[in-house]
Image: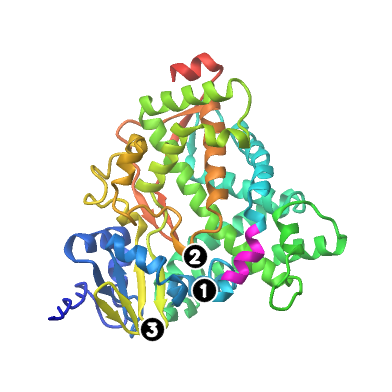
Amino acid sequence: MTLVTPPPIPRAAGSVPFLGHAIQLIRDNLGFIASLRTHYGPMVEITLQPGTRTLIVQDPELIRTMLTDLGPSLDKGRFFEKMGQLLGDSVVTAAGQDHVRKRRQLQPAFGRPQIARYVELMRAETDDAVDGWQPGHRLDVREAMVKLSLDMLAKTIFAGSLDDVTFRRLRDDLSVVMNGVGARVMLPDWMERVPLPVNRRFDAARDAVRATINHAVAELQESGRDTGDMLSLLLHATDEETGRPLTGHQISSEILTLAVAGTETIASVLSWALYEISRSPEIERTVLDELDTVLGDRPVTVEDLSRLPRLDRVVRETLRLHHTGWLVTRRTVTPTRLGDWSIPAGTELAYCQHALHRDPELFPDPLTFDPDRWLDDAQVGAFTPGAFLPFGAGKHKCIGDRFALTELVTAIATIVRRVRFETPPGHEVRPVAQATVRPGVLMMTVRRRNDAAERKDG
Protein backbone atom coordinates (compact mmCIF):
# COMPACT_ATOMS: atom_id res chain seq x y z
CA MET A 1 0.00 0.00 0.00
CA THR A 2 1.44 3.35 -1.08
CA LEU A 3 1.08 6.24 1.34
CA VAL A 4 0.09 9.47 -0.32
CA THR A 5 2.01 12.47 0.97
CA PRO A 6 -0.31 15.41 1.53
CA PRO A 7 0.53 18.64 -0.29
CA PRO A 8 2.45 21.20 1.75
CA ILE A 9 0.36 23.78 3.56
CA PRO A 10 0.62 27.00 1.51
CA ARG A 11 1.69 30.29 2.98
CA ALA A 12 -0.38 33.40 2.32
CA ALA A 13 1.32 36.06 0.25
CA GLY A 14 2.16 39.50 1.59
CA SER A 15 3.98 38.80 4.86
CA VAL A 16 6.64 41.35 5.86
CA PRO A 17 9.44 41.13 8.46
CA PHE A 18 8.53 41.92 12.10
CA LEU A 19 4.83 42.54 11.27
CA GLY A 20 3.90 39.38 9.37
CA HIS A 21 0.42 39.84 7.89
CA ALA A 22 -0.51 42.59 10.36
CA ILE A 23 -0.69 45.22 7.59
CA GLN A 24 -3.38 43.26 5.69
CA LEU A 25 -5.27 42.65 8.90
CA ILE A 26 -5.19 46.33 9.84
CA ARG A 27 -6.29 47.47 6.38
CA ASP A 28 -9.11 44.96 5.88
CA ASN A 29 -9.08 42.03 8.26
CA LEU A 30 -12.38 40.51 7.08
CA GLY A 31 -11.48 40.90 3.43
CA PHE A 32 -8.05 39.36 3.97
CA ILE A 33 -9.39 36.35 5.89
CA ALA A 34 -12.22 35.82 3.37
CA SER A 35 -9.73 35.95 0.48
CA LEU A 36 -7.86 33.01 1.96
CA ARG A 37 -10.89 30.77 1.34
CA THR A 38 -10.85 31.78 -2.32
CA HIS A 39 -7.13 31.44 -3.02
CA TYR A 40 -6.03 28.57 -0.80
CA GLY A 41 -7.10 25.10 0.25
CA PRO A 42 -8.13 23.41 3.52
CA MET A 43 -5.39 25.16 5.49
CA VAL A 44 -3.19 28.18 4.89
CA GLU A 45 -0.38 29.67 6.97
CA ILE A 46 -0.26 33.32 8.05
CA THR A 47 1.96 35.19 10.50
CA LEU A 48 0.42 37.07 13.41
CA GLN A 49 3.49 37.05 15.64
CA PRO A 50 7.12 36.81 14.46
CA GLY A 51 8.43 33.28 14.96
CA THR A 52 4.96 31.77 15.51
CA ARG A 53 3.23 29.67 12.88
CA THR A 54 -0.51 30.26 12.52
CA LEU A 55 -2.61 27.94 10.37
CA ILE A 56 -6.05 29.14 9.26
CA VAL A 57 -8.25 26.03 9.09
CA GLN A 58 -10.84 26.47 6.33
CA ASP A 59 -12.35 23.03 5.69
CA PRO A 60 -15.55 22.48 7.76
CA GLU A 61 -14.68 18.87 8.56
CA LEU A 62 -11.21 19.85 9.76
CA ILE A 63 -12.73 22.66 11.86
CA ARG A 64 -15.17 20.19 13.43
CA THR A 65 -12.32 17.76 14.14
CA MET A 66 -10.23 20.53 15.69
CA LEU A 67 -13.04 21.65 18.01
CA THR A 68 -14.47 18.26 18.99
CA ASP A 69 -12.10 15.32 18.53
CA LEU A 70 -8.93 17.31 19.25
CA GLY A 71 -10.54 19.83 21.58
CA PRO A 72 -9.44 18.28 24.90
CA SER A 73 -5.79 18.04 23.75
CA LEU A 74 -5.45 21.60 22.44
CA ASP A 75 -4.66 24.82 24.25
CA LYS A 76 -7.01 27.69 23.41
CA GLY A 77 -4.39 29.69 21.55
CA ARG A 78 -3.27 33.27 21.23
CA PHE A 79 -6.65 35.00 21.14
CA PHE A 80 -7.79 33.50 24.43
CA GLU A 81 -4.32 33.64 25.95
CA LYS A 82 -4.22 37.37 25.29
CA MET A 83 -7.77 37.74 26.60
CA GLY A 84 -6.61 36.04 29.80
CA GLN A 85 -3.60 38.35 30.10
CA LEU A 86 -5.73 41.42 29.50
CA LEU A 87 -8.87 40.51 31.46
CA GLY A 88 -7.90 37.71 33.85
CA ASP A 89 -8.15 33.91 33.91
CA SER A 90 -11.74 32.77 33.32
CA VAL A 91 -13.88 29.99 31.86
CA VAL A 92 -13.67 31.77 28.49
CA THR A 93 -9.88 31.80 28.41
CA ALA A 94 -9.03 28.55 30.25
CA ALA A 95 -8.22 25.25 28.53
CA GLY A 96 -8.08 21.57 29.50
CA GLN A 97 -9.02 20.51 33.02
CA ASP A 98 -8.85 24.11 34.21
CA HIS A 99 -11.65 24.94 31.77
CA VAL A 100 -13.69 21.91 32.85
CA ARG A 101 -13.41 22.93 36.51
CA LYS A 102 -14.35 26.54 35.86
CA ARG A 103 -17.24 25.50 33.62
CA ARG A 104 -18.70 23.38 36.43
CA GLN A 105 -18.45 26.33 38.79
CA LEU A 106 -20.31 28.67 36.44
CA GLN A 107 -22.80 26.23 34.90
CA PRO A 108 -25.56 26.82 37.52
CA ALA A 109 -25.66 30.51 36.54
CA PHE A 110 -26.57 29.49 32.97
CA GLY A 111 -29.02 26.69 33.78
CA ARG A 112 -32.66 26.71 32.74
CA PRO A 113 -34.07 27.79 36.14
CA GLN A 114 -31.82 30.85 36.25
CA ILE A 115 -32.46 31.80 32.63
CA ALA A 116 -36.19 31.61 33.28
CA ARG A 117 -35.71 34.19 36.04
CA TYR A 118 -33.64 36.42 33.75
CA VAL A 119 -36.31 36.78 31.04
CA GLU A 120 -38.43 39.22 33.04
CA LEU A 121 -35.35 41.35 33.80
CA MET A 122 -34.30 41.30 30.13
CA ARG A 123 -37.77 42.32 28.98
CA ALA A 124 -38.03 45.13 31.52
CA GLU A 125 -34.66 46.56 30.46
CA THR A 126 -35.71 46.37 26.81
CA ASP A 127 -38.97 48.20 27.53
CA ASP A 128 -37.04 50.91 29.41
CA ALA A 129 -34.70 51.30 26.44
CA VAL A 130 -37.58 51.62 23.95
CA ASP A 131 -39.23 54.22 26.21
CA GLY A 132 -36.17 56.42 25.73
CA TRP A 133 -36.17 56.35 21.93
CA GLN A 134 -37.76 59.42 20.34
CA PRO A 135 -40.24 58.66 17.53
CA GLY A 136 -39.22 60.30 14.28
CA HIS A 137 -35.61 60.69 15.41
CA ARG A 138 -32.64 58.84 13.97
CA LEU A 139 -31.09 56.33 16.35
CA ASP A 140 -27.55 54.98 16.39
CA VAL A 141 -28.82 51.42 16.62
CA ARG A 142 -25.57 49.72 17.53
CA GLU A 143 -24.84 52.17 20.35
CA ALA A 144 -28.40 51.69 21.58
CA MET A 145 -27.94 47.90 21.51
CA VAL A 146 -24.62 48.15 23.38
CA LYS A 147 -26.36 50.15 26.09
CA LEU A 148 -29.26 47.68 26.19
CA SER A 149 -27.03 44.61 26.35
CA LEU A 150 -24.98 46.20 29.13
CA ASP A 151 -28.17 47.06 31.01
CA MET A 152 -29.45 43.48 30.66
CA LEU A 153 -26.09 42.10 31.76
CA ALA A 154 -25.93 44.41 34.77
CA LYS A 155 -29.40 43.36 35.92
CA THR A 156 -28.68 39.66 35.60
CA ILE A 157 -25.23 39.89 37.22
CA PHE A 158 -25.47 42.69 39.77
CA ALA A 159 -29.21 43.06 40.49
CA GLY A 160 -29.41 46.33 42.43
CA SER A 161 -25.87 46.48 43.79
CA LEU A 162 -24.68 49.31 41.51
CA ASP A 163 -26.02 52.85 41.74
CA ASP A 164 -26.77 54.78 38.54
CA VAL A 165 -23.57 56.82 38.57
CA THR A 166 -21.39 53.74 39.10
CA PHE A 167 -23.27 51.84 36.42
CA ARG A 168 -22.84 54.59 33.83
CA ARG A 169 -19.13 54.74 34.61
CA LEU A 170 -18.87 50.94 34.33
CA ARG A 171 -20.63 51.01 30.96
CA ASP A 172 -18.25 53.69 29.63
CA ASP A 173 -15.18 51.83 30.86
CA LEU A 174 -16.40 48.54 29.39
CA SER A 175 -16.91 50.25 26.04
CA VAL A 176 -13.25 51.34 26.01
CA VAL A 177 -12.12 47.82 26.90
CA MET A 178 -14.34 46.19 24.26
CA ASN A 179 -13.05 48.54 21.58
CA GLY A 180 -9.42 47.91 22.49
CA VAL A 181 -9.28 44.15 23.03
CA GLY A 182 -9.33 43.26 19.33
CA ALA A 183 -6.29 45.37 18.44
CA ARG A 184 -4.33 44.12 21.44
CA VAL A 185 -4.99 40.50 20.53
CA MET A 186 -4.07 40.83 16.86
CA LEU A 187 -1.07 43.18 16.97
CA PRO A 188 2.45 42.16 18.10
CA ASP A 189 2.93 42.15 21.87
CA TRP A 190 5.50 44.92 21.85
CA MET A 191 2.98 47.43 20.52
CA GLU A 192 0.90 47.37 23.70
CA ARG A 193 3.95 48.44 25.71
CA VAL A 194 4.38 51.63 23.68
CA PRO A 195 3.14 54.54 25.89
CA LEU A 196 0.49 55.69 23.41
CA PRO A 197 -2.72 57.42 24.58
CA VAL A 198 -4.81 54.51 23.27
CA ASN A 199 -2.82 52.06 25.41
CA ARG A 200 -3.12 54.25 28.51
CA ARG A 201 -6.89 54.59 28.00
CA PHE A 202 -7.29 50.84 27.67
CA ASP A 203 -5.25 50.07 30.80
CA ALA A 204 -7.07 52.70 32.86
CA ALA A 205 -10.51 51.52 31.73
CA ARG A 206 -9.73 47.85 32.39
CA ASP A 207 -8.42 48.62 35.87
CA ALA A 208 -11.49 50.74 36.60
CA VAL A 209 -13.86 47.95 35.53
CA ARG A 210 -12.07 45.45 37.74
CA ALA A 211 -12.15 47.88 40.68
CA THR A 212 -15.90 48.41 40.27
CA ILE A 213 -16.57 44.66 40.16
CA ASN A 214 -14.26 44.01 43.13
CA HIS A 215 -16.11 46.65 45.14
CA ALA A 216 -19.49 45.07 44.32
CA VAL A 217 -18.17 41.64 45.29
CA ALA A 218 -16.79 42.93 48.60
CA GLU A 219 -20.06 44.70 49.49
CA LEU A 220 -22.14 41.60 48.80
CA GLN A 221 -19.74 39.40 50.76
CA GLU A 222 -19.91 41.78 53.71
CA SER A 223 -23.70 42.02 53.68
CA GLY A 224 -24.22 38.25 53.40
CA ARG A 225 -27.28 38.85 51.20
CA ASP A 226 -28.35 36.35 48.56
CA THR A 227 -29.72 38.50 45.75
CA GLY A 228 -30.37 35.50 43.51
CA ASP A 229 -28.36 37.02 40.67
CA MET A 230 -25.28 35.70 38.89
CA LEU A 231 -22.95 37.45 41.31
CA SER A 232 -24.55 35.68 44.27
CA LEU A 233 -24.25 32.33 42.51
CA LEU A 234 -20.54 32.91 41.95
CA LEU A 235 -20.08 33.94 45.57
CA HIS A 236 -21.55 30.60 46.64
CA ALA A 237 -19.53 28.56 44.14
CA THR A 238 -16.53 26.59 45.39
CA ASP A 239 -13.28 25.52 43.80
CA GLU A 240 -13.56 21.76 43.41
CA GLU A 241 -9.82 21.33 43.95
CA THR A 242 -9.57 23.29 47.19
CA GLY A 243 -13.21 23.28 48.34
CA ARG A 244 -12.87 27.00 49.01
CA PRO A 245 -15.07 29.79 47.70
CA LEU A 246 -13.87 31.73 44.68
CA THR A 247 -11.75 34.74 45.53
CA GLY A 248 -12.88 38.24 44.68
CA HIS A 249 -10.21 38.35 41.96
CA GLN A 250 -11.49 35.11 40.41
CA ILE A 251 -15.07 36.35 40.42
CA SER A 252 -13.96 39.67 38.98
CA SER A 253 -12.10 37.93 36.14
CA GLU A 254 -15.10 35.77 35.26
CA ILE A 255 -17.51 38.70 35.21
CA LEU A 256 -15.13 41.02 33.35
CA THR A 257 -14.54 38.46 30.60
CA LEU A 258 -18.22 37.55 30.32
CA ALA A 259 -19.10 41.24 30.15
CA VAL A 260 -16.65 41.97 27.34
CA ALA A 261 -17.42 38.79 25.40
CA GLY A 262 -21.19 38.79 25.93
CA THR A 263 -22.10 42.46 25.66
CA GLU A 264 -20.29 43.10 22.39
CA THR A 265 -21.64 40.01 20.64
CA ILE A 266 -25.25 40.43 21.78
CA ALA A 267 -25.25 44.12 20.77
CA SER A 268 -23.94 43.32 17.30
CA VAL A 269 -26.34 40.44 16.63
CA LEU A 270 -29.32 42.51 17.85
CA SER A 271 -28.28 45.39 15.59
CA TRP A 272 -27.96 43.15 12.55
CA ALA A 273 -31.29 41.41 13.24
CA LEU A 274 -33.18 44.72 13.54
CA TYR A 275 -31.46 45.99 10.39
CA GLU A 276 -32.45 42.92 8.36
CA ILE A 277 -36.03 42.96 9.66
CA SER A 278 -36.35 46.64 8.75
CA ARG A 279 -35.16 45.95 5.19
CA SER A 280 -37.76 43.26 4.46
CA PRO A 281 -41.48 44.09 4.91
CA GLU A 282 -42.29 40.42 4.32
CA ILE A 283 -39.97 39.16 7.08
CA GLU A 284 -41.22 41.91 9.40
CA ARG A 285 -44.87 41.06 8.72
CA THR A 286 -44.44 37.31 9.33
CA VAL A 287 -42.51 37.92 12.56
CA LEU A 288 -45.21 40.32 13.82
CA ASP A 289 -47.99 37.92 12.81
CA GLU A 290 -46.31 35.14 14.77
CA LEU A 291 -45.85 37.34 17.84
CA ASP A 292 -49.48 38.49 17.73
CA THR A 293 -50.73 34.91 17.34
CA VAL A 294 -48.61 33.53 20.18
CA LEU A 295 -48.62 36.48 22.59
CA GLY A 296 -51.79 38.45 21.88
CA ASP A 297 -51.47 41.63 23.92
CA ARG A 298 -49.27 40.24 26.69
CA PRO A 299 -45.46 40.49 26.97
CA VAL A 300 -43.15 37.64 26.01
CA THR A 301 -42.34 35.08 28.73
CA VAL A 302 -39.86 32.25 29.00
CA GLU A 303 -42.58 29.75 28.02
CA ASP A 304 -43.01 31.55 24.69
CA LEU A 305 -39.41 31.25 23.56
CA SER A 306 -39.88 27.76 22.11
CA ARG A 307 -43.16 28.75 20.44
CA LEU A 308 -41.70 31.35 18.06
CA PRO A 309 -40.14 29.32 15.22
CA ARG A 310 -40.23 32.18 12.71
CA LEU A 311 -38.33 34.51 15.03
CA ASP A 312 -35.96 31.67 15.86
CA ARG A 313 -35.14 31.31 12.16
CA VAL A 314 -34.50 35.06 11.89
CA VAL A 315 -32.05 34.82 14.80
CA ARG A 316 -30.39 31.75 13.31
CA GLU A 317 -29.97 33.40 9.91
CA THR A 318 -28.54 36.51 11.60
CA LEU A 319 -25.99 34.32 13.37
CA ARG A 320 -25.09 32.80 10.01
CA LEU A 321 -24.81 35.90 7.81
CA HIS A 322 -23.57 38.29 10.48
CA HIS A 323 -21.59 36.11 12.86
CA THR A 324 -19.52 38.16 15.27
CA GLY A 325 -16.54 35.78 15.45
CA TRP A 326 -13.81 36.41 12.93
CA LEU A 327 -10.79 34.62 14.36
CA VAL A 328 -11.10 31.82 16.93
CA THR A 329 -7.85 30.20 17.99
CA ARG A 330 -6.46 26.95 19.35
CA ARG A 331 -2.84 25.80 19.87
CA THR A 332 -1.23 22.38 19.58
CA VAL A 333 0.48 21.25 22.79
CA THR A 334 1.99 18.09 21.28
CA PRO A 335 2.56 16.94 17.68
CA THR A 336 -0.98 16.62 16.34
CA ARG A 337 -2.65 14.95 13.37
CA LEU A 338 -5.28 17.11 11.67
CA GLY A 339 -6.70 15.48 8.57
CA ASP A 340 -3.78 14.41 6.38
CA TRP A 341 -1.31 16.77 8.00
CA SER A 342 1.04 16.38 10.96
CA ILE A 343 1.10 19.65 12.90
CA PRO A 344 4.09 20.39 15.16
CA ALA A 345 3.60 21.31 18.82
CA GLY A 346 3.28 25.03 19.46
CA THR A 347 1.39 25.75 16.23
CA GLU A 348 -1.48 28.24 16.34
CA LEU A 349 -4.70 27.02 14.68
CA ALA A 350 -7.52 29.41 13.87
CA TYR A 351 -10.79 29.55 11.97
CA CYS A 352 -13.17 32.35 10.97
CA GLN A 353 -16.87 31.79 11.60
CA HIS A 354 -17.81 34.90 9.64
CA ALA A 355 -16.07 33.66 6.47
CA LEU A 356 -17.17 30.06 7.02
CA HIS A 357 -20.85 31.01 7.20
CA ARG A 358 -20.59 33.03 3.98
CA ASP A 359 -18.91 30.37 1.85
CA PRO A 360 -21.02 29.81 -1.33
CA GLU A 361 -19.92 26.17 -1.44
CA LEU A 362 -21.57 25.63 1.95
CA PHE A 363 -24.62 27.92 1.79
CA PRO A 364 -26.44 28.72 -1.48
CA ASP A 365 -26.66 32.45 -2.19
CA PRO A 366 -24.76 33.12 1.05
CA LEU A 367 -25.02 36.93 1.13
CA THR A 368 -28.82 36.86 0.98
CA PHE A 369 -30.63 37.10 4.32
CA ASP A 370 -33.05 34.18 4.03
CA PRO A 371 -34.53 32.82 7.28
CA ASP A 372 -36.44 30.22 5.27
CA ARG A 373 -33.20 28.40 4.46
CA TRP A 374 -33.69 26.96 7.99
CA LEU A 375 -37.34 26.03 7.42
CA ASP A 376 -36.94 22.45 6.23
CA ASP A 377 -35.17 19.97 8.49
CA ALA A 378 -34.13 17.93 5.45
CA GLN A 379 -32.62 21.03 3.86
CA VAL A 380 -30.77 21.92 7.05
CA GLY A 381 -29.54 18.34 7.30
CA ALA A 382 -28.03 18.67 3.85
CA PHE A 383 -25.70 21.44 4.99
CA THR A 384 -22.09 20.33 5.33
CA PRO A 385 -21.37 19.18 8.91
CA GLY A 386 -19.32 21.80 10.69
CA ALA A 387 -20.45 24.57 8.32
CA PHE A 388 -22.66 26.35 10.88
CA LEU A 389 -21.01 26.99 14.25
CA PRO A 390 -22.79 29.91 15.92
CA PHE A 391 -21.48 29.01 19.38
CA GLY A 392 -18.51 26.83 18.50
CA ALA A 393 -18.48 23.10 19.25
CA GLY A 394 -17.01 20.51 21.56
CA LYS A 395 -15.99 20.90 25.19
CA HIS A 396 -15.27 24.60 24.70
CA LYS A 397 -18.62 25.44 23.15
CA CYS A 398 -19.87 28.79 24.48
CA ILE A 399 -21.19 28.33 28.03
CA GLY A 400 -23.67 31.16 27.53
CA ASP A 401 -25.33 29.94 24.31
CA ARG A 402 -28.77 29.45 25.86
CA PHE A 403 -28.46 32.72 27.77
CA ALA A 404 -27.54 34.57 24.55
CA LEU A 405 -30.43 33.11 22.54
CA THR A 406 -32.81 34.03 25.35
CA GLU A 407 -31.54 37.62 25.33
CA LEU A 408 -31.83 37.87 21.56
CA VAL A 409 -35.37 36.48 21.23
CA THR A 410 -36.66 38.39 24.26
CA ALA A 411 -35.21 41.72 23.10
CA ILE A 412 -36.27 41.38 19.45
CA ALA A 413 -39.80 40.24 20.35
CA THR A 414 -40.18 43.22 22.68
CA ILE A 415 -38.67 45.83 20.36
CA VAL A 416 -40.41 45.00 17.07
CA ARG A 417 -43.87 44.97 18.66
CA ARG A 418 -43.40 48.51 19.93
CA VAL A 419 -41.38 50.24 17.20
CA ARG A 420 -40.36 49.83 13.61
CA PHE A 421 -37.16 51.11 12.06
CA GLU A 422 -36.66 52.87 8.75
CA THR A 423 -33.30 52.61 7.02
CA PRO A 424 -32.38 55.55 4.75
CA PRO A 425 -32.79 54.59 1.05
CA GLY A 426 -29.61 53.17 -0.42
CA HIS A 427 -27.93 52.93 2.97
CA GLU A 428 -25.95 49.72 3.16
CA VAL A 429 -24.31 48.76 6.42
CA ARG A 430 -20.93 47.07 6.17
CA PRO A 431 -19.36 44.74 8.75
CA VAL A 432 -16.33 45.97 10.69
CA ALA A 433 -14.12 43.55 12.61
CA GLN A 434 -12.53 44.68 15.85
CA ALA A 435 -12.77 42.40 18.88
CA THR A 436 -15.84 41.02 17.09
CA VAL A 437 -17.58 41.63 13.77
CA ARG A 438 -19.96 44.52 14.27
CA PRO A 439 -22.07 46.69 11.97
CA GLY A 440 -20.48 49.93 10.82
CA VAL A 441 -22.51 53.14 10.95
CA LEU A 442 -26.11 52.04 11.51
CA MET A 443 -28.50 54.99 11.85
CA MET A 444 -32.22 54.20 11.58
CA THR A 445 -35.33 56.30 12.19
CA VAL A 446 -37.64 55.11 14.97
CA ARG A 447 -41.39 54.87 14.30
CA ARG A 448 -43.80 53.97 17.07
CA ARG A 449 -46.33 51.15 16.63
CA ASN A 450 -49.58 52.11 18.32
CA ASP A 451 -51.67 48.97 18.28
CA ALA A 452 -52.01 45.42 17.02
CA ALA A 453 -53.64 46.52 13.76
CA GLU A 454 -50.66 48.70 12.92
CA ARG A 455 -48.30 45.87 13.82
CA LYS A 456 -50.01 43.63 11.29
CA ASP A 457 -49.92 46.35 8.65
CA GLY A 458 -46.15 46.74 9.25
Q: Main secondary structure of the magenta part?
A: helix
Measured Cα–Cα span from mark 1 to mark 3 = 15 Å
User: Which label lies toward us, 3 or 2?
Assistant: 2
Where disc 2 sits, the SS reads helix
* Cα–Cα span, label 3 and label 2: 19 Å
Q: Specify the label residue 343 is tagged with.
A: none
Residue 291 rendering spot, x and y as whole percentages: 52, 26
Q: Quadrant of residue 277?
A: top left
Mark with earlier residue (1, 3): 1
Is 155 in front, or is 246? 246
- Give the numbered dot on residue 95: 1
Q: Residue furthest left?
A: 2
Q: Quadrant of the C terminus?
A: top left
Residue placed most toward the observer, 322 or 243: 243
The residue that label 2 is drawn on is 396
In the rendered image, which quarter is residue 283 located in?
top left
The disc, 3 or 2, on the residue closer to the chain's N-terminal end is 3
Q: Is residue 335 above or below residue 61?
A: below
